[in-house]
Amino acid sequence: MMGFFGRRRVDKRVARGVAIEVWECRGIRTLHLGSQAVQSAMRVARPDSLELAYTRAMMAWPLFCPQAREVLMIGLGGGSLVKYLLARDTGLRVTAVEIEPVVVELARRHFALPEESARFRLRIADGADYVPAHPAHADVILLDGYDAGDQVEGLATLSFYQACRRALRPGGVLVVNLWGGSPDFDHYFSRLSEAFGGHLAWLPVEGKSNVVVFAGGAEVRCPGREDARALGRRWGLDLPGYARALCWAEEHGAGTTAPGKKAGKTTS
């Protein structure tokens, strides 16, 4: 099916009553779950790069946890973060948890998702069940769980965020992609604040409605300027720029002001 300006549909499946589609336009392949919202994007000529700004913002986690060795991803999408992590760091081990087998199939078929290996494990499971069952499991948790409408509620409850904290090793960090336009955004942010005792930082993604939140213990802090530069060279990202753009919550537990009200978040 050909759309406007050469946009064509590459694949379409229906799972649990939701249309899951892959489109391509001008060398960019995108994944959609029941709506026009882009769940994942890949430049066909550079499948290991991070095409979407919010995925690059999520990759600011090395500022907080530079020695991480175990990364847990909740929500696979097209596997952009998996590919980037495996291509950039030969020591990291990545586990991706995805509830929908059709998404996994499309990621393999159209988004160059790598096969499982000693460094990459894929689990077909509900993240809301997997995380509580794996305490002290990961140094970094990347949470990007969306369905056709909004954040998956089971991945945004207070009890789930508390389970994420228990699933982190000492010094670990939870990274959450939130949609600032959600009517429940303030609730999600407040739950994160309560679960992590107010130890939050966030990045409003420029020109988008995404807000990427970093949550950890009191010991989680950004490195100095020189260390941020070194990390940026290692990961091929403007980590010093992200360090300057970070907004920090006041460390007074639950009730921290949501960034949509405090950080000047923009919308697309």
Image (tube, grey):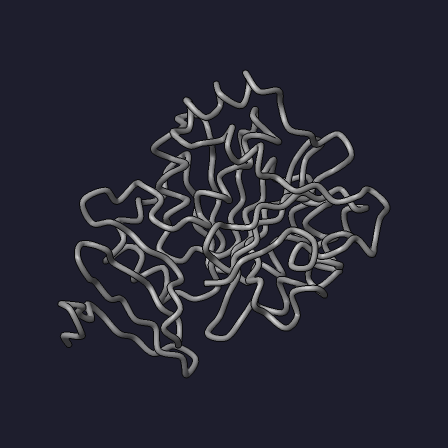
Q: Which of 87 and 62 is in front in this view?
A: 62
Residue shown at the point (46%, 30%) measured from the top left:
92
Q: Position of residue 101 (x, y in %)?
A: 39, 65
Answer left or right for 249 relative to 61. Answer: right
Q: Which residue lies furthest to the top in this view?
A: 226
Q: Where is residue 234 in the image (x, y as percent from the top left)?
A: 42, 23
Residue shown at the point (19%, 67%) measured from the top left:
10
Q: Position of residue 86 (x, y in %)?
A: 38, 35
Q: Quadrant of the N terminus?
A: bottom left
Q: Where is residue 184 in the image (x, y as percent from the top left)?
A: 66, 70
Image vertical order of residue 138 relative to residue 25, above or below: above
Answer left or right for 37 relative to 186. Answer: left
Q: Nearer the viewer, residue 258 or 192?
A: 258
Q: Which of 157 and 70 is in front in this view?
A: 157
Answer left or right for 175 relative to 268. Answer: right
Q: Residue furthest right?
A: 252
